Amino acid sequence: MGLTRQYLRYEPAALFGLVASARAGVAFVALRGERGRYVAVPACEHVFVWDTRKGEKVLILKGLKQQVSCLCPSPDGLHLAVGYEDGAIRVFNLLSGESAITFNGHRAAVTALQYDHLGGRLVSGSKDTEVIVWDVINESGLYRLRGHKDVITQVLFLKEKNLLVTCAKDTLVKWWDLDTQHCFKTVVGHQAEVWGMALLSKEKRLITGSADSELRVWDLTYIQEVKDPDEPETKKSKGSSPGAEENTEEDETLELDEHPEERIVKCSKVGSIMREGRDRVVTLGTDRMGKFLACHGTDAVLEVFSVLSEEEIQKKLEKKMKKARKKAKQNSEEEPERSVELSLQEEIQWVTNVKASSKIKSFDLILSPKGELKMVLLLQNNVIELYNLDLSAQVLQAVRVSRLTIGGHRSDVRTLAFSSDNIAILSAAAESVKIWNRSTLQCIRTMECEYALCSLFVPGDRQVIIGTKTGKLQLYDLASGSLIETLDAHDGAVWSIALSPDQHGFVTGGADKCVKFWEFELVKDESSVQKRLSMKHVRILQLDEDVLCVRYSPSQKLLAVSLLDCTVKVFYIDTLKFFLSLYGHKLPVLCMDICYDGTLIATGSADRNVKIWGLDFGDCHRSLFAHDDSVMYLQFVPKSHLFFTAGKDSKIKQWDADKFEHIQTLEGHHQEVWCLALSPNGDYVVSASHDKSLRLWERTREPLILEEEREMQREAEYEESVAKEEQSVVAGERQGQTGLAGKKTIETIKAAERIMEAIELYREETTKLKEHNAICKAAGKEVPFPVNPILRAYGNITPSAYVLEVFKKVKSSELEESLLVLPFSYVPDLLRLFNEYIQQGSDVELLCRALLFLLKIHFGQITSKQMLVTVIENLKKTTISRVNEARDVLGFNMAGLQFLKREIEAKDEVTFFADATECFEEKKRKRKKKEKMVLAVL
């Protein structure tokens, strides 16, 4: 066997040029004890935390491969739950930036996430139309709720009751009782998709946003509350009739029997609030206190509403009553007790409109202690804007405080270039040119330009040239960041630009069917003494079709021109005479490159193929099916016959032009890759995509062996197919409203395999031990027993202790799914071991959870096996006694904590948990007031 050719692997080095992706929401996070300063935003597969005051990135929560689709901070502000496109959910610690918990349950992108008010449970909704409730503390799934027929758009926990509200694109709002895990009520008052909802007025109101300009408001009445005699009388709402209070209990029970779903909650429509926007609601939300409500459509306007509290409503009603009484006195009428009520528009008042600089994707609100409403807006064009609304001002007007823009372009980057020293990277989009430092990834220059299509660094790296969509060539000076010169080069778009190998000039190709040759020259301006660089048009080559790409051969003898008629024509540079026509692509050639020795030319086309041609006779060496969509860019690695291609299928691939082999795929971008650039030394690749990100890839010293690469690819495909397999079914369970929260993944299968291996080792070791004891008995002396190397590695533990170690290492969120995969032949051994462990009192909680699940799924087989009856009987005794012990310990600890709380409250004479923060804020305010007064006196 001959030596295999070794290649060097390119690894992802950095992601930059991205402020925020418009795929998920934005959220204020508490960091370093401050609220309202730091915001978390999605950034492709990562989450960036920005300091809005300094405009700096302070934390990166690193994802794996999938894009972020949803964010939700925990109520304590210490964690951030992140949902991904593949249905995974990861919970990050904001202090360390690490992810400790991963939940796998959804089969499609996570679209909604919400914590309960204590932060102990997390609910997620997905594109797979299912809702899953997770236990964050135990790191496991509780149950899956099925019922919606389309994408879930919002999920909300109720604070007081163990209820859940969900809405989806199927026009329905569903109410779920989490005690019994079933849907007890469906609200059907919407004509189109329900895009968002929010709970207001201490959860007495629900507001929903749909595809029109109407925000529908629903009154919520909790039936148990009404029956409670100690409860004070509820306030009259606009929707209630004057005689509603006189209803007898009999009427109420009759009414409830007619509508059994209203035994828990009654949901009646009160009215609507009209928005100014005519399109659908994109995001609808409130601040954490529920005092402000805001929503926006597909435009750039955020509408802010104020929600009056019960005290404010009472005051308004009293004022109205006074006015009504005055009127009644003047008109000498009876006092109008019942006619006074507040309209919905008075209870939920429009405050202001916030006009952003571009279309809004999402927002978050926070009410600061100073009485300011802070609003952060994530825009569609890679921008974050922060607005403040001073609530004490006479005229309520939102003021823009900060805008994060410097970290990226507003539109897609269409051209990239590397400087000759491999340090600077140029990126140009529809509105600006940016120069980046490759090592620090900082943007060092931003210059306004027209719609850029191609670019190059002028030799010396002090100037850059941009070719635009309008046919202009723009020359910029990097030191001053100014536009030196603009030339009208072509009548159509300048599609391509190439520097001549002698570096004295360059060539451009445009949509006006011309190839133009230019030379650099120094000209003297009338205004200045020094000469400056300029461009001089020297020759023109007229063709029959639009020019899409031009490339020089390294010897500067030939010029390759790709045309709109799907051909590539090669001309002699000195005479401009025709030399070769490369014909074979079915669609136009969008990109091409000539290798360093001038022997090969590679062409990439919109027909998804790359063809490799010899430049001596124009023969096609090989045609490669390169991408699943158009090949957008192609470039050879300097001093080699390897080349990179970028495609609209979001992949970048490396190929060998001698062996016609695919070497590696650089996966990272999530949408079309428009362009790439290789550094002159071949160590770096930079790429730009429709997902607004720029990615840097670095050549490592690690050799890449093709056989290994193919093997890894096959493994990845197998793992993906395993995850997509149909879920295993629990015996006797039918596809109902609820189900198991987890899903089968390669991790759960591996965990089950590890448990099986551990039980097999336990079986082997116990039989060996029995044999050893028999040998010792026969010999009449102690014979040395060979210890298994695995058990020795764990510190000479017993086989049964090893099984427990393996069991404890299974992730809590994957436990049920792993046990579901486990064959029944291993269950009897596991049950005996469980009995042993529980008797010892180790990990009672975990073992009980596993035991109950195994009994649930293998109930029939366990009960029919006579040999397991005694095991189950023993388990029953030990489990009950151990669980009681654990419960007593918990009860004792709870009582101790309650006692400590009372002690501290008695000492400080302040309600410890509720009022401590309020008192602290009050003291702070008083101190500041005093300081101001002292200053005023001085």
Image (cartoon, rainbow, N blue to C red):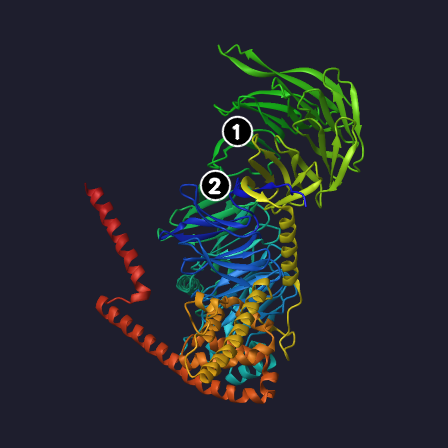
Rendered image quadrant of residue 77: bottom left
Number of numbered discs overlaid on the protein picture:
2
C-alpha span from label 1 to label 2: 17 Å
Between 529 and 801, the one nearer to me in the picture: 801
- Disc 1: CA contacts within 10 A as few (<14), some (14-19) or many (>=20): some
Seen in the picture, residue 798 relative to 320 is either above or below; the reply is: below
> In this orientation, which residue lies closer to the viewer: 273 or 634?
634
Q: What amino acid is at disc 2?
A: Leu
Q: Identify which residue, 721 or 546, lies in the foreground.
A: 721
Percent x, y for residue 99? 47, 57
Q: Dividing the picture into quarters, in which one does residue 905 lie?
A: bottom left
Q: Which residue is mark 2?
A: 404
> Residue at horizontal 63%, vertical 27%?
467
Q: Is 142 rendered above or below residue 519?
A: below
Going by the numbered disc 1, the residue's amino acid type is Met
Which disc, if any, is residue 268? none
Residue 174 in the image: above or below residue 457: below
Circle 1 sits on which residue? 447
Secondary structure category for the residue under label 1: strand
| Picture coordinates of residue 324, whole percent (x, y) | 44, 63
Q: Position of residue 178 (x, y in %)?
A: 52, 73
Answer whether residue 416 is visible to the viewer in this image.
yes
Q: Quick check: can you spot residue 143?
A: no
- The residue closer to the viewer here, 403 or 420, is 420
Whichever of labels 1 and 2 marks the residue nearer the N terminus, that label is: 2
Judge left or right: residue 715 versus residue 525.
right
Position of residue 775 relative to residue 329, above or below, is: below
